[in-house]
Amino acid sequence: MTLQDFKLKMISELSSIYEMDELNSIFNLLAEEYLKIPRSKILLADEIDLNESNQTLFLNALERLKTYEPIQYVVGKTTFMDLEFKVNNSVLIPRPETEELVRLMLKEDLDGKEILDIGTGSGCIAISLAKNLSNAKVSALDISSDALKVAKENAKLNNVEVSFINADIFEYQSDKKYDVIVSNPPYVTESEKLIINKNVIDFEPELALFVKDSNPLKFYKVIIDNCKNNKDPNAIIFFEINENLTDLFLKVFRDYNLKTCEIVKDYKLKNRFVKVVIN
Ligand SMILES: C[S@@+](CC[C@H](N)C(=O)[O-])C[C@H]1O[C@@H](n2cnc3c(N)ncnc32)[C@H](O)[C@@H]1O
């Protein structure tokens, strides 16, 4: 089987799931990963004969893709803020919106600050902040020890120091003060499950995604309450939010008399981030 034969097979078997441009980029990712050829040379490699072990790799990937498994899990990695991150199904695949969250933060003068990323998952936010802020002290917390394993590998891969904390944010107690807190917590409501794509529902960790309809802002509340009541009343907090919960967010936190509660839109012009300053 040549690389071109595989490409044609892949297109015919996946065209009901993916658009043509998605199929092209999936094919390029597989060829780069399994044949170690640069993207610019892939077109010239059509006639390469795949040896038995490469055929097995490509065909196994195709079987996994047919089940709607995201390509990032199939190849075990993704790119975020121009950095490489390992991913597996214990971590959420970092999203482009979250890159915008990091860029929003990098507009502020954060070097030298103590930063805490709550619900770090793959570590994408904490690690890219550490990479871009050489003097910041970055910590990252997650309840999932499997996610933290991946995040630790990613810190090593990207050659940055991040202190990792394995804890449930609803129970976490510490005297440490942070200047900046960031969180992209679970924010998809159970009732929104119905409109979520199969590749997300079947493969990404539930723990990273969903909150109950009865208390969808619980992560934001505990983080703001912790800062307000005991720890870091002067901290700047950056959140990623569910655009459908913006009005509820503003309503719930109106009573908090926050100094700043600024909603920022993402590149799709959806309400996606909030910058909060308490005092
Ligand atoms: C939406 S994911 C965000 C992952 C990553 N920060 C990103 O932006 O791609 C939310 C993360 O919160 C973690 N999490 C869920 N419940 C938690 C809790 N009670 N305490 C701490 N972390 C929690 C999940 O394990 C998951 O890694």
Image (spheres, grey):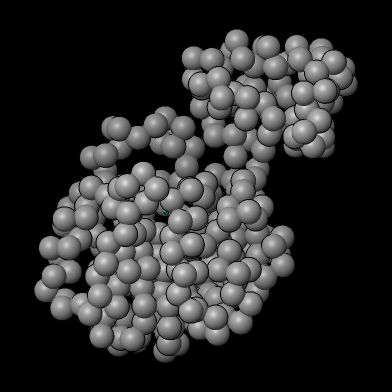
Q: Considering depth in this image, is 254 or 62 the residue closer to the camera?
A: 254
Give left or right: position of 42 versus 273. right
Which residue is depicted at the point 55% across and 85% down? 112
Q: Quadrant of ligand 1?
A: bottom left
Q: Which image quarter: residue 12? A: top right
Which residue is depicted at the point 77% across and 33% down? 40
User: How far across and how far down the image is residue 72, in percent?
Assistant: 60, 39
Q: Is residue 115 above or below residue 83?
A: below
Which residue is depicted at the point 43% across and 51% down? 97
Q: How many marks?
A: 0
User: Can residue 55 be seen in the rendering of this structure?
Assistant: no
Q: Which image quarter: residue 24? A: top right
Which residue is depicted at the point 35% across and 35% down? 196
User: Can residue 104 be seen in the rendering of this structure?
Assistant: yes
Q: Is residue 60 above or below residue 129?
A: above
User: How far across and how far down the image is residue 202, in percent?
Assistant: 45, 34
Q: Considering depth in this image, is 4 or 224 the residue closer to the camera?
A: 4
Q: Considering depth in this image, is 90 or 13 the residue closer to the camera?
A: 13
Give left or right: position of 143 versus 217. right
Which quadrant, please, contains the C terminus?
Answer: bottom left
Give left or right: position of 258 versus 133. left
User: How far across and how far down the image is residue 11, in percent?
Assistant: 61, 15
